[in-house]
Image (cartoon, rainbow, N blue to C red):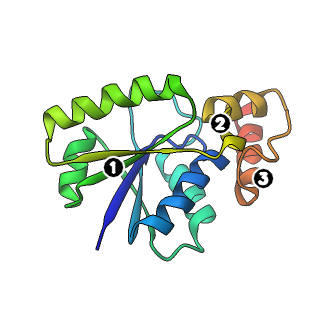
Amino acid sequence: MKTVIYPGSFDPPTNGHLDIIQRAARVFDKVIVAVLNNPEKNPMFTVAERRKMLEMITKEYANVEIDDFNGLLVDYVREKQVSIVIKGLRAISDFENEMQMALTNRKLAPDIETIFMMTNHKCSFLSSSVVKEVVAFDGCIEGLVPEQIQDYIIEKRNSQRK
């Protein structure tokens, strides 16, 4: 059984993230979507909230599991006894950063492979940062994030304003 780990911050999950999850779920027997708990970042959503949103948008996929991790990705991948990481790419600028990370991971763990998957061209402009900026200025996030979590994101923004 081929299992892949799709790591990321997912703060919040976007339609681009969902595109990669859906396509990976068709290619691999199991997809573990792993939310990184990065204390260096100032996330809009807690790890628990990000997990909840990911569970909401992937509940129809029996072969998708949501998890979270701290520390090095290679340590988490080994802990899960998986040897493949999948990363989504939107543009050439993503490739440069992701290639550097993949090569670093290969240096740390030569037995772990990184596979790059291009996101759907309709999502190529999309990032969690863009979504957070749009929602911060009361813009419409329809079409940017899965419908199931739009209200959740807006409620979070509203609660942060109080």
- Residue 14 visible (yes or no): no
Residue 122, x across and y down, in percent: 72, 43
Q: Nearer the viewer, residue 99 or 5?
A: 99
Q: Earlier in the sequence, mark 2 or mark 3?
A: 2
Mark 3 = which residue? 151
Q: Does 15 sit left or right of 43 as displayed?
A: right
Residue 154, x across and y down, in percent: 77, 44
Q: CA distance from mark 3 to mark 1?
A: 31 Å
Q: Does 82 sit left or right of 108 as displayed?
A: right
Mark 3: amino acid: Asp
Q: Are marks 2 and 3 in contact (CB under 8 Å)?
A: no
Name the residue rendered at 56%, 62% in the picture: 22
Could you say which quadrant of the image residue 159 lies in? top right
Mark 2 = which residue? 124
Q: CA distance from mark 1 to mark 2?
A: 20 Å
Identify whether 155 is placed above or below 126. below
